[in-house]
Amino acid sequence: MSDWAAQAAGDLFQSAPCGYLITKDDTTITAVNDTFLVWSGHAREQLIGRKLTALLPADDRALYITYCQPLLAMTGAVNEIALDILNYSGEQRAALLTANRSHGTTTGEPVVRVVILGSYEQQFHERALLAAGRAAATSPTGRADAETRLTHLAQHDPMTGLLNRVGLTALLHRLFLTPPIDRSRPALLFVDIDHFSSINNCLGHSAGDELIVVVAQRLRAALRHLSTLARPSGDEFVIVENVTDTAELIVLAERLLERVHVPVSIDGVDVMPSVSIGLAVAGPADTVNELFRNAETAMHRAKSAGRNTWQLHDPLTLDPTVDRLRIIDELREGIGRGELQVHYQPRVDVATGRVHGAEALVRWQHPIRGLLTPDAFIDIAEKSGLIHELGARVLDDAIAQVTSWNRARANCPPLEIAVNLSARQLADPTMVDVVVDALSRHDLEPWLLTLEITETALMINPDEALRALTALRALGVVLAIDDFGTGYSSLTYLKRFPVQELKIDRSFVAGLGIDTGDTAIVASCIQLAHAVGIRAVAEGVETVAQQQALVALHCDLAQGYFLGRPVPPERFPVTGPTGVPGPAA
């Protein structure tokens, strides 16, 4: 083999868009390419010397040992065996495995070359690479063109023309090796299309492909000139940035959410696409893989938070080795300095589309890490006891704000305000006094205040919760069970506790009109609420289809990003119908 051919073979092994491994007959891994490392999240040093079968779930491990290994010994090859690979966190990733058995070029010992294909789209890439390789071999004068074509095919996605995972990884490695010219740091936005599998299942894979292209175009149109957009796999996109402040990422994420969330007709069906975005900025000691994983983890948190939103990776809350006392001190000082802000999300009358009220949602404007959502600090506030001071502050601000709005509305029906209560607040014997004091100081009618309690909070000490809720109900405030359907004794709660509102969890609302099971659950929850004389509220409404389904099911109230995002008080639509903000007080 010529030097050029040997080098080309090595380059192809490392940069091919498929995962390649070389093993001994006993499946001990002796070599692995970069694509497999990025795809699986493993580090090379963790894999060399490890058994390939250790990366397979038990059933697939048995399949490989009982079927693949004997077939390799007899015929020298196995083709396109569907199995799962365990990634760095133990999650299963679907793959196709192709392998052939031959003798190593240096030792002469038998080796097995394994190809891991994450999708049939990658198979297309592999065939294109082979075609380019043949062109180089048969036409010496076209060698330079073939090398250029090989590089492009290896690093770009054929559907969108964007960088693929291999090209993205190469770019990130170059970025990490290049000294910054200022205080900027590499950053990623990990973007995933919401409910993509449902669209694929309902409209077909061609419609899914069309949606991917549309989202890619919208993302690209919303980016800055120096930004890089990549499509590492499936319905995932990654945006590479250099930033000096996380606020830059947040502004960009908000712009992307807005640009993507516009209706599009696909195969004659109107689709309202949305994405979930994870943001991560490289720390001083971070590697490329760590930055990628941090952004992906933040994206999954955005999914859990209701989709069509963004989440920022925060090492202070995710790293258990960080001194939590320092974070508690920051939070205590932040409360004292007024860094905790209340944003308001519209609660809309489903039948009329009019704004019925708002839910108060706390945010922390951290002086270094920017605007933080509750999942970054509420758990710390709970465990440290700061939740009492924080909760009282949010309650007071929310009641004062809705009172101000109602005074400005003159002859309009008054707005209601909903505030969340945690388990520790519910157990506080002074909680009723705190509510009484806030209502009286701001002169708000009790029935305009809704206190939301999760099923989990009720489960901690049901007898204590019953006493607290009974006392609160005696004041005239409205009580709601939040995230209904995710606990263990939902029906018992409706019978036992004096509640007037049932909030249907967003995980069920997400499948409205798509998943027959979710639609049936939401319908049953609404019917159940009405049967016991209380109102039903749907949370996490993200599409016009979900809103229309709730109208047909006679749901009372709804909230979600389609109806209105959480916003500062000056941006809240005080008088206008949903989607058409009126003049704020």
Image (cartoon, rainbow, N blue to C red):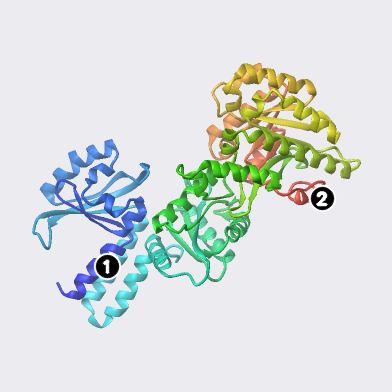
Q: In this image, 89 relative to 265: left or right?
A: left
Q: In this image, 522 relative to 348: left or right?
A: left
Q: Which residue is mark 2?
A: 584
Q: Amino acid at mark 1?
A: Asp
Q: Residue at x 52, y 49 (%)?
A: 314
Q: Amino acid at mark 2?
A: Ala
Is residue 444 at all visible to an observer of this figure? no
Decide which of 99, 9 is in the foreground and name it. 9
Decide which of 437, 38 is in the foreground and name it. 437
Residue 306 percent coordinates (x, y): 58, 42
Q: Quadrant of residue 494?
A: top right
Residue 360 percent coordinates (x, y): 71, 40
Locate the N terminus by quadrant: bottom left
Q: In this image, 234 relative to 309: left or right?
A: left
Q: Residue furthest bottom?
A: 141
Q: Residue furthest left?
A: 108
Decide which of 400, 26 is in the foreground and name it. 400
Judge the density around disc 2: few (<14), some (14-19), many (≥20) Cα neighbours within 10 Å. Answer: some
Which mark sits nearer the N-terminus, 1 or 2?
1
Q: Which residue is mark 1?
A: 11
Which element is circle 2 on?
loop
Q: Residue at x 65, y 21 (%)?
A: 465
- State the CA–CA distance, disc 1 to disc 2: 61 Å
Q: Quadrant of residue 500?
A: top right
